[in-house]
Image (cartoon, grey):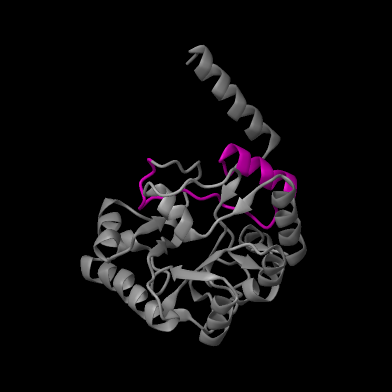
Amino acid sequence: MYHRVGEADNTWEARYAISAANFAAHMRALATAGYRPVTIDAFVAWLEGGPELPEGAFLLTFDDGFRGVREYALPILESLRWPFTVFLVSDLIGSEDVWTRKSNPGGQTYPLLDAEEIRDMQRRGCSFHSHTRSHASLPALDDAGLADQLAGSRQALSQLLGQEVNYIAYPFGHLDARVEAATDTAGYRAAFATQPGFNRRDVNRFRIRRLDIYGTDTPTRLLRKVRLGSNDGSLGGQFSYFASRLATRLGVS
């Protein structure tokens, strides 16, 4: 899971913004290691018992819909002919990421894709789905507000795109059982969280796991994250992972 593609202005932004050069290096590293992205439809169909995915398959997603994805990531991904998905905040199309203003120490906000840019990317092979209406923390809403964020975004984006919007990524990764049930009721086929790990066919389709990829991640660290299914791509994290697996096999608690 990526967010903004572009330069970071401070250390807080460096977690969510990756430079175009580092993003290109990430994609080259994945390709060289034998990984290939699949479409979101193919991935969810597989979860539902559909056709097998090829070896090395993964899903490439961007949250929020920053303009930098079109400017910097799209040409790289087009050159590779790699599919990807962007989750859009429907009420803020053509606006900026105002929800980060209080969190970002610098107070900066960055432009989000507008309707024409979205349609252009759609024609060029990008798929778009929901990230709610306003990037709200869904568990904090009452039932009416929750339904509005889920159904309102789905309806608005379906009208913009001229096709069904079947998937959603939870803002901030915030969810609970009530949010999960409301997402199902709103007509979504699957929903994406921010909990790391591997997705197998028995994963809850309304709590699909994703890895957080940071702008400070080197290609080597990225590959460790992918191989371990962990947000910790450090050497220490790798050691802990294999030590835990060995202990499990040996029956050591």
| Residue at position x 46%, y 80% in the image | 92
Q: Is residue 110 above or below residue 166?
A: below
Q: What stretch is highlighted in magenta?
A: 202-231
Asked if residue 28 lies left or right of residue 147, the reply is right
Residue 209 falls inside the magenta stretch:
yes
Residue 60 falls inside the magenta stretch:
no
Res. 193 in view: no
| Residue at position x 54%, y 84% in the image | 114
Q: Position of residue 213 (x, y in %)?
A: 61, 53
Looking at the rendering, which quadrant does residue 178 occupy?
A: bottom left
Q: Is residue 27 above or below residue 251?
A: below
Residue at the limit of the structure toward the left, as seen here: 143
The N terminus sits in image quarter? bottom right
Residue nearest the viewer, comparing 244 with 249: 249
Looking at the rendering, which quadrant does residue 90 occupy?
A: bottom left
Q: Position of residue 9 (x, y in %)?
A: 70, 68
| Helix, strand or loop for the magenta stretch, by majority | loop
